[in-house]
Image (cartoon, grey):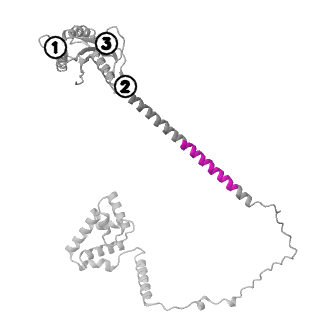
Amino acid sequence: MSQPRAHSVVCKHVVSRKTHTMLGSQEQPGIIPRAVKEVFKLVDVQEKEQDGWEYSVGMSYLELYNEKVLDLLSPGSQDLPIREDKDRNILIPGLTRTPLLSFTDFDTHFIPASLNRTTASTKLNQRSSRSHAILLIKSSPDSSVLDRLLALEKMMMGSAERERLNLLKTVAQSRKEIQMLKEKQKELEDKANMLNKQNETVEKESKDALLFKTDLPPLHRKPSTAAKPRKQQAVVTPLQVSQVQPLQQCAVVCKPSQFLDKKKKRIQTEVCEGKENGGVDRPSADDVNWESHLDSALLEQSRKKILQTLNSGSLKDLKSLQLIGDKKAKLIMGWREIHGDFTWLEDLKKIEGITAKRFSSFIKANILSSMGK
């Protein structure tokens, strides 16, 4: 036998120039009359398909006005509360539920209840509703049928079934008690282990104290009768001037190697050039005149390629340039973010640590490298 199904219809009636749509007329019924007739048709079909089942249909009609819930089937009632059950279903305790036997019965209750709604006059309508109305239609199996089903279910459960259920309850209770006893036993064992450890610690400390305990009196040091030796004062003789030899006589004269001579000459030359140039690090004549020996078109092409790398190259691309390390590459990228692209290659001198001579060496090394020289 299949389980009966309950049918419910909720119609929200908001009168805002839609009264005809919801209610209609005798010749053209609206949404609410059509929905209620459909519920009664479904009930008739269910009763015919499921022999022995009977259904009951009921209606509730409420109004929401100024945040108050009013029962339209019982106009004298006060504001009703709104509740929510554990399944998050909305409930309104105290709301009237009127049983219906047919559509005519519904019409008899619905029309007078609609007249209980709160209305007011507007420019377009002398009797305009100022609230929201909700109509609930619910059909469910008759309570007497459900009672018979419950009684039949109790009869089917014999004494053997009840004994089995009682036995299962007893077993479950016993298991619960056994688990509680195990937990209690573990707790007592932990306390006993803790006490044993404390006793062992106390015994060990007592044994150590007895080991170092002695009844002998403390030893006293006898005073010494020997005479203390007299301290001798050191005598420092003054240093004679004649004993100090000149440093030039003691120095070891070493013959400088050829490599040191070349390095010394190069350092002296750089120092002299710096003095002649006013102490400023400037490129030498060789660093300036080397460009005159190269083809002008290739030279210009190489300079543009270097400028493009400085403006759009990544950190790895910048480090691939000659005489540019990790630190200089990061300084170039930082300068680009602040000032934008380099307009000329000479703008590279604005980077910290790139002097005129270092710039000249940078240009020479990268152009000759690109030309394969």
- Looking at the picture, does residue 308 appear above or below residue 145? below
Q: Residue at x 19, y 9 (%)?
A: 104
* Left/right of residue 163 with respect to residue 98 in the rendered view: right
**What x and y, as percent, mark residue 155?**
32, 21
Q: Which residue is mark 3?
A: 96
Type of residue at label 3?
Thr
Contact between marks 2 and 1 (CB within 8 A): the answer is no
Q: Residue at x 43, y 83 (%)?
A: 268
**Magenta span of residues:** 185-205
Asked where in the image residue 42 lies, by quadrant, the reply is top left
Label 1 residue SS? loop
Q: Residues within 10 Å of mark 1 (few under 14, many from 20)?
A: some
Image coordinates for residue 321, horizontal then vertical, percent: 30, 70
Is residue 132 visible to the viewer in this orientation of the structure?
no
Magenta stretch: dominant SS?
helix
**How far apart, in angstroms, are the residues tagged by discs 3 and 2?**
43 Å
Quadrant where the N terminus sits is: top left
Q: Residues within 10 Å of mark 2 (few under 14, many from 20)?
A: few
Residue 2 colored magenta?
no
The front one of 11 and 209 is 209
Nearest to viewer (mark 3 / mark 2): 2
| Label whose residue precedes the other's in the sequence (1 or 3) | 1
Image coordinates of residue 143 in percent, x first then y, are 29, 16
User: Which image quarter: residue 44?
Assistant: top left
Q: Check disc 2 and give the amino acid type.
A: Ser
Tell me the residue that label 2 is attached to.
Answer: 159
